Amino acid sequence: MTFPVRFLACNLFISLLLACLLLLKKGLKKHITLTMQYQLWYVFVLVLLLPFLPYQIAAPKKLKLLIQQFFPRSFDISSIAAGNVHKTAASEGPIQDLSMAVASSDSLLNRVLFGIWIFGILVASVFFLYSATKIFLLRKRAYLITQQTEPDLFQLFSSCSKELGIQRKIRLYASCSLFTPVSYGWLKPTVMIPQDLDILLSNEDIRFIFLHELQHYKHKDALLNDLICFLQIIYWFNPFIWYAFGQLRSDREIACDHSVLHVIGSSQASNYGYTILRYAGQMQKGMYLSPVSTMGGRKDSIRQRITEIAEYQKESVPQKVKSIGILILALLLVFCSSPLLTANAAFSSPSLIDDGNWETIELSPYFHEIEGSFVLYDMTEGRYQIYNEKLSRQRVSPDSTFKIYSALFALEEQVISPNASLQKWDGEKQPFEKWEQDQTLSTAMRDSVNWYFQNLDHQVGLSKLYSYYQRISYGNCDLSGGTASYWAESSLKISPVEQVRLLSNLLENEWSCKEQNIEAVKTSLYLGDTSLGKLYGKTGTGMENNQHVNGWFVGFLERDGHTYCFATHLQNSDEADGSHAAAITSQILEHIL
């Protein structure tokens, strides 16, 4: 699935999360402090950032797998034979990943959507720059209030800063073009007030205004304002997000009022309210996409602020505790939803080959009416040949072909080494006599000994395994099936195109593994010299309900200075097994090469 489509899907889910957040705030209003009602918006801002974060940063699966490894699933080893797994009724059969269908569709729609999005960003950026320029010119024409220019105002402003425990120097300007006080800037925090403020208002009113604007600095609202402007530009097309930011700004001012009342006391609430009424109705015009915090606002917002000021009460300890619990609940909701929000990976499709470096090839006679696909990649020429392009992009269980990478991860983690790969047989009855003995990497790979690789995975640990699968981008990277069978008609899925791409990356050591470990895996895959060249490979077979559902043969061939990576996959046939896949591959290679 391409980014425009994934991003639109993320926006749908973000809108649902916004509805949940608003319902949470409304339903639990009496249990949440005003400060926490504002801080819940930080969680929403995090949600809006998730689509642009790497999936590894926001992946609940890793935490789940870390916990899961302490509670290993029981399994009947006798039911697993050389990659042939009888699947339980609760499991799912091979399905086509949604991302495949979208990825292989015409890209014109994606280009149009992306172009519209970028155009909207450019237009919104112009409005933001216009607002930023207006603020700059306002400040440029304003004059700086200092001890020399306005000693009384400067002294009162400094006194308010000390009262709030602010150590940093905050600049104070007066402007004849302003109707209401504003604050902005997190690198160079600034407060601007109307030029006639000290003439029209008493010292008490001015003190209230200074405390309000300085509270914005304490709350780090300037940084949040800049971030909101950035997100409004990115999400310019989503009206629900614009509505959310309107509510955020309203809650920001209410939280700021509440903080001021906490300083001046409830006895001054009515006086503070009159000050707000005097200036809050004066909205600064033309501040679309503006990063400033202003005392102005919509009439309904002002009405709500006055109501909260009139009903001001100090926050109780139980209310604070409940608020923290609700915040944690909101964070957990976002954390668990992150796979649906991470547009760069959560819905990621396999890496597509370039349009110019692949061609279709007709091989149906070799498949004998068996449903399947074949992918060949010439690493020297950088060119693909594909039979049944649609199925070549369909993700299914890897079955025993996963053992190639299970071995690599165990070598990298030093569970085994190229010169010491022996694993002891525990004496348990096995489906095959060859399995009932100690195994090395070479013998285990040759005879596809399941217990050997299950031992390796168990020693590496699910959490570490997950990191490795993410690192190499192995299919859907889903190990929730557990170390016993995540690879066998269970959670892990991969397509033939991805199999070939991974083999190519393995041989080129794209993941910066130790060279001796790459060689050890390569040696374990060696099948022998053929008339075509040196052949390396691994079969895999999957079954469910006593029926063959998957047959794999993946590997590579070294011939005349060329290295060819290949993957053959068969499905939904009595002949869909590793042996038939290997036989078909041999015939195809003879035909092509």
Image (cartoon, grey):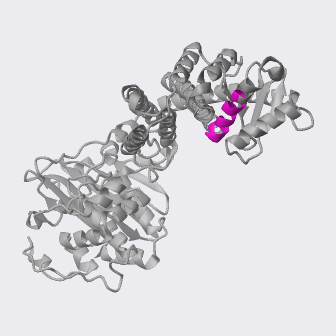
Name the residue at the right extreme. 148
Quadrant of the frame with the C terminus: bottom left
Image quadrant assignment for residue 252: top right
Q: Is residue 68 above or below residue 167?
A: below
Quadrant of the frame with the N terminus: top left
x, y percentage for residue 259? 59, 34
- Relative to residue 540, is residue 352 drawn left or right? right
User: In this orientation, which residue lies closer to the viewer: 161 or 136?
Assistant: 161
Image quadrant assignment for residue 277: top right
Q: Is residue 448 above or below residue 275?
A: below
* The magenta segment: 208-221
x, y percentage for residue 106? 44, 33
Image quadrant assignment for residue 402: bottom left
x, y percentage for residue 472? 42, 60
Residue 16: in sight, yes or no?
no
Q: Is residue 211 magenta?
A: yes
Residue at the image point whose x is 68% and y is 33% from the top: 211
